[in-house]
Amino acid sequence: MSGASTAQKPLSEAKVTVYRRMKDLPSTHLLGGGTAMCAGCGGLEALHEVYDVIGANSIFVNAAGCMTLLSVYPFTPFRGSWLYTAMASAPAGAQGVRDALDILLEKKRMTAQEDMDVVVLTGDGSAYGMGLSSTSGAIERGLDFLYLCYDNEGYGNTGQQYSGATPHGARTATSKGAHGFTGYKKDLFSIWAAHKPVYVATVIGAEPLDLARKIEKAKALKGPRLIIALAPCPTGWDYDPIHTVEVGKLAVKTGVWPLKEYADGRIVHTKVPHERAPVEDYLKLQGRFRHLFDPQRDEALLAEIQARVDAYWAGVSE
Amino acid sequence: MTRVLLTGNGAAAWGARLANVDYVPVFPITPQTEIIETIARWIGDNEMDARLVTLESEHSMITAAGSAAATGVRVFSATSSQGLLYAMEMLYTVAGWRAPFVLVNVSRGLSAPITLEPDHNDILAARDSGFLQIHCSTCQEVLDSMLIAYRLAEDERVRLPVIVNLDGFYLSFTREPVELPEADSVRDYVGGYHTDTTLFRATSPASQGVAVLGGGPYSYFRYELHLAARNALTVYDELASLFAERFGREHPAIDTYQTADAEIVFVMMGSFATKARAAVDRLRDAGWRVGLVRPRLLRPFPHGQLRRILDGKQGVAVIDQNLSMGFGGVLHSELASALYGQTGAPKILVSFVAGLGGRDIADEEFFEMAAVTKQAVQKNEIPPPRLLYTESELREVRKLQAVAHVEREEIDKTRDENARGSQ
């Protein structure tokens, strides 16, 4: 995938009109506060930023996960609509809503003013696993929708068991051995991009300008647009909520979470960390990697993790 | 009005066409596929103004059906057997959304062993989901039931999805003469899709399917769903009367045949009940006072009407084309719960299980079931449930097993020889 990178200017640069500097970002959020999300939730941080760009003329179609608890009867933080489906089929729910809206418009039973952006909102548990089949189907059908996956790298709502998104070596509720999770994080970005949708991007709440530009661009496009937001998770990753932004920034600085986008058959890295910090800087902030440092350093595993990140960036040309 | 020869599947497709559906999310499965192929052809030929979308599974298909209905379009979908079970989570979910649409299920036995022929374990698995259920025994009934079903689903006192059930092969692929009502008179009967429910619109945002905390609100919404399903009893009767008035065909919640003076009554659902109906004629020729009761409406369950129809009967033979493993026939237990403790209810309720995976029920078996029930009445003692099976059927299975054993022995012998050879 990284081999597909080119030196061309990202399409987003050309289309960005509003978000040039940090001060262009809204100073207040559209999404209501007081939800049941944990303090320091990196997923909620990203959702706030996404929602500011998407706006209230939208319907969020949700799959089972932490954010299902955003809307608990009779409250919702959304200014627009919300539909909770099930864990596996939020993209199919978006299909039904989008098709119905199109039919109503075509048959002139609804005015264009009543139309909405259809947004799927799921965690990594659904996106990387149970919901992948319905996502694949929605992309192949060319569904006009935006998909936001908040990826906290485990089944967070049930106590952080490992999922297809869990990184190598991470300790979770179901990978408590000496070396943590023995598998490797699934490359969902590439899986989605292999379908050749209109747009795929990775974002993180700690880089709000990069995020806002990508969502702005995605909003302006038509067709399947899919976003993965790495979501630092104080409860699941075991760090103090005060460090959410720092953990997020380090995910980018160390090169662990490449910020990139796919459009028109090309992958472009939107924020390349030229002098990458060692991955240790990112890992040692998190309790889920404590066994790599304490009681003694697991040099082999640390070297392996660093080598994988280095290998990724070695394949990225600018 | 036109009279044409249609399969049950063809009648179902016509039902969707005449009801002016807007949206048809589909997934192919035998023996239902002809329905969606027919609709796809009509849409392709501009004979039907609807959008058909093939989802990647029945789970997604029902999700799309429910979410589209909740957004304000009239939806039709169809499935069978494994497909219905694959969608099971979403059947409960979209019923909870109170999303009104019509789903046709073409009944087919469930795996394992995998088969194509019909019984009712698939549809009965959806019994408690919140979908209402109408069971058909003729192709005409399939078409007519769908038109009634759309009004029933969309009635403000109900607002629930409805399954119209027909049996695979016996109905799905059997051609019968069907009267096609005029499109205008159907449009007048079914009406436009109701929009005074929760719909998603930019200027009037709504939340649907939201979480609740605790048993209080949860129970409230589940009781509401149940009470809406119970309302459907009255609404169904109104709609069936109106249908009879407009189209001249009666489709009561419970179909009865020769029950007025009957002492012994068969109770059965679906197309196999036509076999029971023929047996009633022959039994009557032989001097037996027998009749047939065929519930068309299984959900909501018409307790009251069943009590009235069976009041004063001596014995009832319930023939279940399903099997609840470790329990027995489902319809038998439902009927028993409706009749228990009621004055005038028949004392003898005998359970028979038959017709699994399309197994035929022969005339002589109906005679035998009537005889067993009559004997039970005379003895005033209910015999244990019977699983219908003949000696010749058992002999056929023994033959298959013999072939399997011979082949197995051959494989074992070859393996042993190879093992010796390699030593």
Image: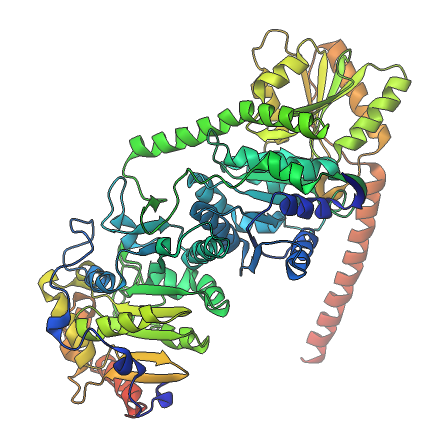
User: Is B368 on the left or on the right of A188, as rendered?
Assistant: right
Q: In the image, what residue occupies the spot 56% across and 11% down?
A: B341
Q: Nearer the viewer, residue B266 or A143?
A: A143
Residue A252 location, quadrant: bottom left
Residue A53 location, quadrant: bottom left
Q: In the image, what residue occupies the spot 13% across and 78% down?
A: A281
Q: In the image, what residue occupies the spot 58% across and 54% down?
A: B50
* Quadrant location, the C terminus of chain B: bottom right
**What color scheme is it?**
rainbow
Please state the horizontal and vertical placement of residue B163, each as a whole percent of the image. 58, 39
Q: Nearer the viewer, residue A179 or B72?
A: B72
Q: Is B21 drawn above or below residue B158 in the view shown?
A: below
Please state the horizontal and vertical placement of residue A75, each as a whole percent of the image. 24, 43
Q: Residue furthest top?
A: B343
Numbered-mark total: 0
Please state the horizontal and vertical placement of residue A15, each as a whole percent of the image. 28, 78
Q: Is B313 drawn above or below residue B135 in the view shown?
A: above
Please state the horizontal and vertical placement of residue A155, each as a whole percent of the image. 31, 59
Q: Is A112 drawn above or below residue B295 in the view shown?
A: below
* Quadrant location, the N terminus of chain B: top right
Q: Nearer the viewer, residue B230 or B122?
A: B230
Q: Can you see residue B185?
A: yes
User: Is B398 on the left or on the right of B84, as rendered?
Assistant: right
Q: Can you see residue A169?
A: no
Q: Is B187 drawn above or below residue A309 in the view shown?
A: above
Q: Nearer the viewer, residue A25 or A47?
A: A25
Q: Residue furthest right?
A: B286
